Image (cartoon, rainbow, N blue to C red):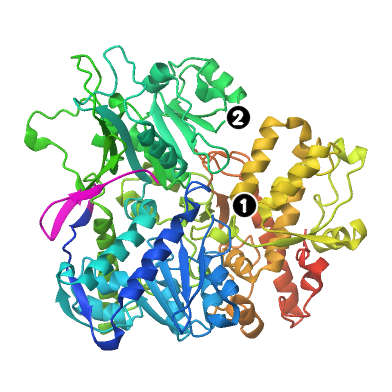
Amino acid sequence: MLPSQRWRTGPGSAVEGQRAGGRTLLRTNRRVHCQAWSGGSQLTERDYGHLEAAAKLAQSAQGLTQPHPNAGCVLVGADGRPLAETFHRAQGTTAAEALAVTAAGPAARGATAYLNLEPGDCHGEAAAVDALVRGGVSRVVVGIRHPLRHLRSRAIGLLRGAGVRVDVLADVLAVGRNGGPATAAAAASGSGSDIEAYGPYDPSSSQGSASAYGALSACLEANEPLLHRAVLRRPLGLLKYAMTLDGKIATSLGHSAWVSSPQSRAMVFETRARSDAVIVGGNTVRRDNPRLTTRREGGHTPARVVMSRTLDLPEDANLWDVTLAPTIVLTQRGARTRFQAALRASGVEVVEFDFLTPESVADYCQERGFLQCFWECGGTLAAPAIASGVVHKVMAFVAPKIIGGLRAPTPVGELGFVEMTQAVELVDNTWSQVGPDLMMTGYMPSSGGLWALEATLEAADEESAADAASASAVHLPSSPAPSSPAPPPAAAPATSAAGGGDVKAAAAAGSIAAKRRRGAGGPQGRSVSFYKAWDQWGALSNFSPHPISMPVEPPLAAAAVDGAASSNGNGNGVAAAAAASTSGNGAVRSWPSVEHYYQAHKFAGNHHPDAAAVMEAIAAAPSPEEAARIGRRTERTRPELLRRDWPTAKIGVMLSALRAKFATHAGPRAMLLATAGVSLPPPAPGGAVAAAENGGAVAAAAPCGDAACYELVEASPHDYYWGAGYERTGQNKLGRLLMKVRDELLADLNAASCNSERAWGAGAGPALAGTAAASAAAPASRG
């Protein structure tokens, strides 16, 4: 632990309205209005303590894996004895709630689960909810509702529908709301708390309320980047700088090593590891020649992003060595095309913009699914980044040194201010002592702080609930409020938007990328985009947590290695899959995800002894993200281990894995069919999709040339082979394969319907026979 002392400063008003970037933010300081709760239903000091522990647990994977929604679970038995403490490691891994119930076993019955974040099941099934219900958990205490719109209040509604009591601390404290008709409407719709409110009070008036505030603060801080992305439609922009006591970041000659102490620099390395990207400008590359690494072995490695309009950069910069970490260069179209080609040849990713600005970079990072961008730039870039609103938080170190110099650079360049009243004021400021330095963190007006963001989400819930109540009163049809349980994915595929986001909301937040994408590629308004596993259509991602069983292949023959497709290649549907399932003496192997299988099979059949070791390392990787990291790094640094037929074999490898996934898992299958207008019964907690499929009716399946079918697009802005690429000019191979699998599923459903049989019941058609081998098989192809 680094030695530190902390104290806070902030404005004195209780709630301030602030207009920022077209959004109304509620800036809330520590003395927020709260609601007290009656009788034995009041949350206790023990509840607050367990919630705070869950929030700390949730951050256990920070720096180990790429930033993702952080979820922790503390399971406490009916006798008050702690049973399990778990956390969600990475996207595409087992939910913390499921891990806790498994660890507790029969003792989970009657227990209370403390969750810093509402469960974020977005993989076509309610795995976390199912685990809690099946385990017999009787009460769930949630810190905050999920910030993402497609997940917000969904799990809470499912749990309450299954008879589980749910208390939400953010509702108890009523951030940004003081009761009224909207609150009553929210409660009636199932989005309110199970505890009855009787009025507001000041949280600082008692020890209990102070503990409640501390617990909620911990829950908000655990998902600080997610809150910013959900409300502002951009990654959290964190600007870091270190300056001397007289405000200089370097000498007048540019020397800057080192302004801050080793303790402060260690904190910077930790923050890098918790970020998706580290952003610098061309001046920093030319002056400092940085590496921008985390200075440690293993763990998450953020992308190193260089902004340069002219590409006037040294050709031997340390950042061009991508064996240390990936590097992305963002520039303007046509700049130094030969240098661009050289960078690409060395493995550096180069992206051209018509006009490079901090806003366009923030939008690009949003499209890549980034949650946090760490701006480590100099004053020349920091000023426009602040002025454009893409910096939301500042992390400043002040060293007890004086350097002087009229020409010595300062942390922030010209902002155009001429009066002190124009100065940008930060809110929710925290001062800490780190070694000999002082560290200050605070939120820019573009953010307003975590309580302001949570209040904005609460206000949106209130507005939606009030609209629903008003529509109901006059008997008008209305869309489900975001705070009510979300409909099954089959209800309404989203229009084209990266990660299943709301295009209108993104445009309202000023997303240039959303506007560009809305009119590009595929049928107008008839595409479903997917990318991150936590997005609305997350079950379509290769990173979703769905294991597959695949046949164990013998070593490839020389002819196969020299270019022929492997045994799991481009065969047709069930026949090829069934044949493959009997190869290798009929043995099958389980893989944690499609991504694990795909990355490992880059090295299948290579007789080099290291190739088999790499395959085993990938298979044992604790998350799809880490499997991809091993596979991509090995492909880049050890090309001799890559199977020689990989360019022709990879399509077949991916297709066979996708067939296995969607044949095996009912939730993703229902989501995929929903993109063709086929509605399966919604999942029920405890039994979920599979039980519903076996007992409910399936809508008639339309052929996929029908207008009901949506184009599927992997919205990866950097992958022009499997994805659509930044300008949506990519080949979208993954989306095309998913549409092929969807066609096979539709054909199988239609065949079963014609025979008056259920296509997916136990003992139905050959595609899903109840054997391990057939679970890896796909539905029959119809051409």
> Amino acid type of disc 1?
Pro
Return the residue nearer the eye: 590 or 468: 590
Q: Residue at x 71, y 76 (%)?
A: 760
Assign a secondary structure to mark 1. helix
Q: Which mark is residue 60?
A: none
Q: Residue at x 86, y 52 (%)?
A: 553
The answer to whether residue 143 is visible is no
Q: In the rendered image, which quarter is residue 705 located in?
A: bottom right
Q: Reply yes or no: does residue 10 show up in magenta.
A: yes
Q: Which mark is residue 323?
A: 2
Q: Which mark is residue 624?
A: 1
> Amino acid type of disc 2?
Thr
Q: Residue at x 49, y 46 (%)?
A: 63
Q: Is residue 263 above or below residue 153?
A: above
Horizontal and vertical percent for residue 672? Answer: 60, 63
Q: Residues within 10 Å of mark 1 (few under 14, many from 20)?
A: many
The answer to whether residue 767 is visible is yes
Horizontal and vertical percent for residue 349? Answer: 54, 30
Q: Residues within 10 Å of mark 2 (few under 14, many from 20)?
A: some
Q: Is residue 171 above or below residue 422?
A: below
Query: Sequence-wise, which precedes: disc 1 or disc 2?
Result: 2
Q: Are marks 1 and 2 in contact (CB under 8 Å)?
A: no
Assign a secondary structure to mark 2. loop
Q: Reply yes or no: does residue 274 show up in magenta.
A: no
Looking at the image, residue 466 sits to the left or right of residue 776; the answer is left
- The magenta span reads 1-23
Spatial distance from mark 1 to mark 2, Cα to Cα?
Answer: 20 Å
Looking at the image, residue 778 sits to the left or right of residue 99; the answer is right
Q: Is residue 470 above or below residue 143?
A: below
Looking at the image, residue 606 sits to the left or right of residue 452; the answer is right
Q: In the rendered image, which quarter is residue 260 located in?
A: top left
Horizontal and vertical percent for residue 627? Answer: 65, 48
